[in-house]
């Protein structure tokens, strides 16, 4: 599981947009509004694709260092 920090997640609409896009890509994930994160359950290719999808939606993201 790779955690992506996505500081621009602000509301349920953000969650919906991210969820719809990652589901279309068949990327296993979990979005957390409180912590502003997306957990990607996949290999490096899935993580890279998730970052690309988030970027396409206008969300900056980075892999959590924790």
Image (cartoon, rainbow, N blue to C red):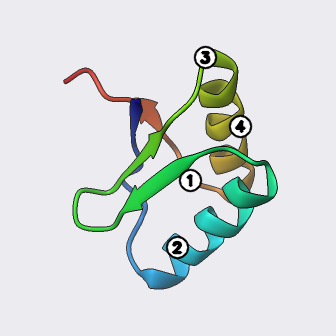
**Which is more N-terminal, label 3 or label 1?**
3
Structural distance between the alpha carbons of marks 4 and 1: 9 Å
**Which is more N-terminal, label 1 or label 4?**
4
Q: Which of 3 and 58 is in front in this view?
A: 3
Residue 42, picture quadrant = top right
Image coordinates of residue 25 in percent, x first then y, are 79, 49
Residues tagged 4 and 2 counted as in contact (Cβ below 8 A): no
Residue at x 44% of width, y 31% of height: 62
Structural distance between the alpha carbons of marks 1 and 2: 9 Å
Q: Classify mark 4: helix, strand or loop.
A: helix
Which one is in front in this view, the residue at disc 1 or the one at disc 2? 2
**Which is more N-terminal, label 2 or label 4?**
2
Residue at x 75% of width, y 50% of height: 56
Residues tagged 1 and 2 counted as in contact (Cβ below 8 A): yes
Image coordinates of residue 32 in percent, x first then y, are 34, 61
Q: Which of 44 and 9 is in front in this view?
A: 44
- Against 45, residue 52 (above or below) is below
Structural distance between the alpha carbons of marks 4 and 2: 16 Å
Which one is in front in this view, the residue at disc 4 or the one at disc 3? 3
Residues tagged 4 and 3 counted as in contact (Cβ below 8 A): no
Q: How crowded is mark 3: few (under 14 residues within 10 Å), some or many (20 or more)?
A: few
Q: Nearer the viewer, residue 61 or 1?
A: 1
Which one is in front in this view, the residue at disc 3 or the one at disc 2? 3
Residue 24, picture quadrant = bottom right
Q: Quadrant of the N terminus?
A: top left
Q: In which quarter of the image is the C terminus?
A: top left
* Residue 44 circle label: 3
Tell me the residue that label 4 is attached to. Answer: 52
- Against 18, residue 3 (above or below) is above
Structural distance between the alpha carbons of marks 4 and 3: 12 Å
Tell me the residue that label 2 is attached to. Answer: 14
Q: Classify mark 2: helix, strand or loop.
A: helix
């Amino acid at each position: 599981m790779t955690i992506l920090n996505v500081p621009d997640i602000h509301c349920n609409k953000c969650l919906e947009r991210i969820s719809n896009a990652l589901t279309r890509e068949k990327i296993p994930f979990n979005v957390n509004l409180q912590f502003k994160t997306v957990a990607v359950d996949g290999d490096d290719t899935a993580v890279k694709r998730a970052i690309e999808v988030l970027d396409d939606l206008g969300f900056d993201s980075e892999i959590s260092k924790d």
